Image: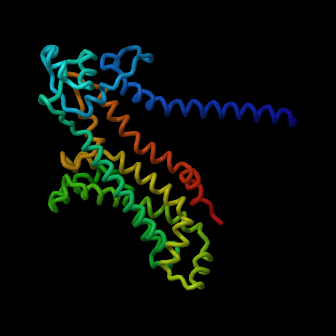
Amino acid sequence: MAAVQTRSERALNRVAIAAVLVITLLFLAPIYWITSTAFKPRNLATTIPPTVIFEPEISPFVKLFTKRSQLRSAPEPEDYAAAPWWERLVFDGGEKVVRSGRGQVQLSGYPNRFMNSLIVAITSTVLAVAMGTFTAYGFSRFKVKGEADLLFFILSTRMLPPVVVAIPMFLMYRAVGLNDTHWGLIILYTAFNLSFSVWLMKGFIDEIPKEYEEAALVDGYTRLEAFFKIVLPEAATGIAATAVFCFITAWNEYAFALIMTNRRAQTAPPFIPSQVGSGLPDWTVIAAGTFLFLLPVAIFTFLLRNHLLRGMSFGAIRK
């Protein structure tokens, strides 16, 4: 009987491993597709069947970062000779596109939009995590009248999809002059992430024994000193995990960024789909912009991966 159970357990383990591998491949397939398309020549981006083996090139990134204009014919030899090496890569790829303007490099809107995404996502994440940590500490350590109702009210701000409140928020922002501003998006993303931050951080802080703070208070620490020197170091794992989730939400947000911004404060998500070529979309440029857009959140998550894995279960364990 024991041998039968052992064989069945091994079979289940093999099935589980196979299922994990299949799911992993399914999740990695879009990333591979975007990455490979970002380095393909334009004529290989939409081939059927897809081209898997090709010589990588960086001309999609050149077209992504510079303004382009379409030529009716191939460039003149003197123009080709005077062009910098990155422009020649585009010419050599068979495309009749040149810089917009002679003798100077004119950047496209992507670098500015990418920087806007960094400013908005980082600032809103810091604010949401900081305010969420203080609020969660208050709910965790003090008796608050109507605590359950207040926590439910905080959570209710996440019950509606963003697109439902986008038009009212647009009208409110237009009335107070926050349309197409960095602070407008920062306030919006902070408010949207705050409820998630409060609830997640409360679970982490609840797991920190109160006796640590009581001992610090007996030793002469103030409540604020005990919070910064005792609670925050113990809650570092939870803070890191919360920051990752808040950053991903703010970094990927599309609906508000599309409706609330135009040029000055527009972020990368609504800008990337607008990168089309002459006549047909230039999928290599769109893939290049998407590939670069994936890097910051991937690097941020990778750097905090140990805190994230521990934090996923830390706040869920009850004594």
Where residue 32 sits, quadrant-wise, is top left
Query: Which residue is more in the foreground, 22 or 75?
Result: 75
Residue 12 horizontal/vertical position (percent) = 71, 34
Task: Say left or right for 160 vs 5.
Answer: left
- Above or below for 319 versus 76: below
Task: Say left or right for 260 vs 159.
Answer: left
**Which quadrant is the N terminus positioned in?**
top right
Residue 246 horizontal/vertical position (percent) = 41, 54
Q: Residue at x 36, y 27 (%)?
A: 38
What colour scheme does the image use? Answer: rainbow
Task: Say left or right for 176 vs 164.
Answer: left
Q: Residue at x 17, y 22 (%)?
A: 82
Residue 158 horizontal/vertical position (percent) = 39, 57
Whether residue 281 can be seen here: no
- Above or below for 165 versus 145: above
Query: Which residue is more in the foreground, 91 or 218?
Result: 91
Q: Residue at x 21, y 49 (%)?
A: 261
Residue 48 horizontal/vertical position (percent) = 38, 14
Q: Residue at x 43, y 65 (%)?
A: 132
- Above or below for 156 versus 9: below
* Number of numbered tags placed on the structure image: 0
Where residue 252 sits, quadrant-wise, is top left
Whether residue 284 can be seen here: yes
**Which quadrant is the C terminus positioned in?**
bottom right
